[in-house]
Amino acid sequence: MSGKPKLHYFNGRGRMEPIRWLLAAAGVEFEESFLEKKEDLTKLQKDGFLLFQQVPMVEIDGMKMVQTRAIANYIAMKYNLYGKDLKERALIDMYVEGMFDLNELLMSYGFQPADKKEQHFATMVDKATNRYFPVFEKALKDHGKDFLVGNQLSRADVQLLEIILMAEECKPDILAKFPLLQSFKARISNIPTIKKFLQPGSQRKPPIREEDVAKVMKIFY
Amino acid sequence: MAGKPKLHYTKGRGKMESIRWLLAAAGVEFEEEFIETKEDLEKLRNDGVLLFQQVPMVEIDGMRMVQTRAILSYIAAKYNLYGKDLKERAWIDMYVEGTTDLMGMIMYLPFQPADTKEKNLALIIERATTRYFPVYEKALKDHGQDYLVGNKLSWADIHLLEAILMVEECKPDVLSAFPLLQAFKGRISNIPTIKKFLQPGSQRKPPTDEKFVALVRKIFNI
């Protein structure tokens, strides 16, 4: 046993990407086992490795953890990316849940049928720029500090950077009205573990390509 | 200021119900302010008290908390319903995410088009009996204890009871193949705070009916 966490998912972002980000930001090396066809998923299910028959699944510290949020919570706590007390955790949780909601929109864009894509795109941009980004811009403005919560790096900062970069892939100038988020982006991107994750050759996954959507759907449906 | 948590939501279950359950189980008295019209929601938004313009929102300990999971995690941690260490928390989180997924399916059922209802209901029962309930039945069987995690009441137990009762509203005999869950249901229902919450006149909300669906569609524009 290598001792490194082992991630089970398809070779793409989906719901596993926030977990890759967190581990990378925490400087934790991890391995990945990719599902490439339906049989790979059914094998994991038949072997009894998936509590609710679903992935993501992460082998970590003797557990086979499932459920994205459970996994992310565990990693964040273990590596001190979850604030110093209950109140900081509450604020981090609120921010992160908002980011998960936006991430759902961003992540599912590639899987929309052609006739729904335009509407979905408009919704994504609207929500990002009118509902979510203003909240984080204001948070940074109000306390004037480098990190979202408690003046130290937390999962909220890591996830916000992830979301910003995904949103920019859809609309490169999406941060035009958010100067503090622009400097936040640069600052957090420069943290050594994160900088490394952002370089080519890391385990960060690219956006799903149209030609791969069918293949991924076949694994799960 | 009353000092009691104050819940802002419509007068129905939706995403707030799990929060009501958890507070009640913890023996925490709470107040509720109901959103009855679109204007009520707009006012909350215009007053700037909804971080992401959404409810549930709970005023608690000087915060205006939003996001269901954030609120639930805070309450669970505050009232010692979140296990004793990181590993117990991990299990509680996994279990709770499962029951959240199951209850989410049931929550959306009344909002589905009429011609898909039967199919969706069948899927809920299938998932309950083949994906979710077996997990909790096995957990109880494997350790033989009264509670899901750490031999002590936690958020996971309260959430599971809520889920069981919701599924039973869809299919009363749904626990027939799960003897340990039946015993669990009896046991957890008898915990004094929970027993009280299950009695008529409590703040527990009834299942969603057509009238409520219409109201929700109007208020939230869906």
Image (tube, rainbow, N blue to C red):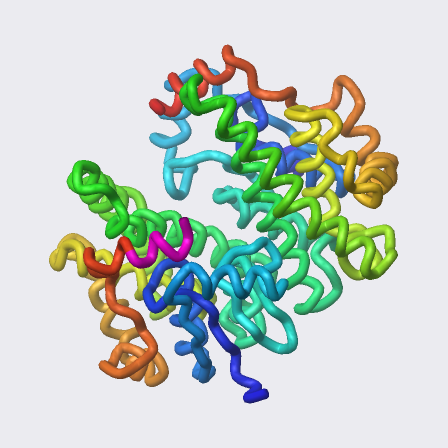
Span shown in magenta: A215-221
Rendering coords of residue B22 (x, y %)? 69, 41
Any part of residue A80 in sight: yes
Q: From this view, report whether residue A150 is shown above or below residue B31.
A: below
- Asked whether A216 falls inside the magenta stretch, the response is yes
Residue B204 position by quadrant: top right
Residue at position x 40%, y 77% in the image: A25
Q: From this view, report whether residue A160 is shown above or below residue A27.
A: above
Query: Of A98 and B58, which appears nearest the observer?
Result: A98
Residue A164 position by quadrant: bottom left
Q: From this view, report whether residue B217 is shown above or below residue B138.
A: above
Query: Of A126 and A86, which appears nearest the observer?
Result: A126
Q: From this view, report whether residue B48 is shown above or below residue B115.
A: below
- Asked whether B55 falls inside the magenta stretch, the response is no
Residue at position x 30%, y 81% in the image: A202
Q: Residue furthest bottom?
A: A2
Residue at position x 21%, y 60% in the image: A209
Left or right: residue A82 compared with residue B177: left
Any part of residue A148 in sight: no
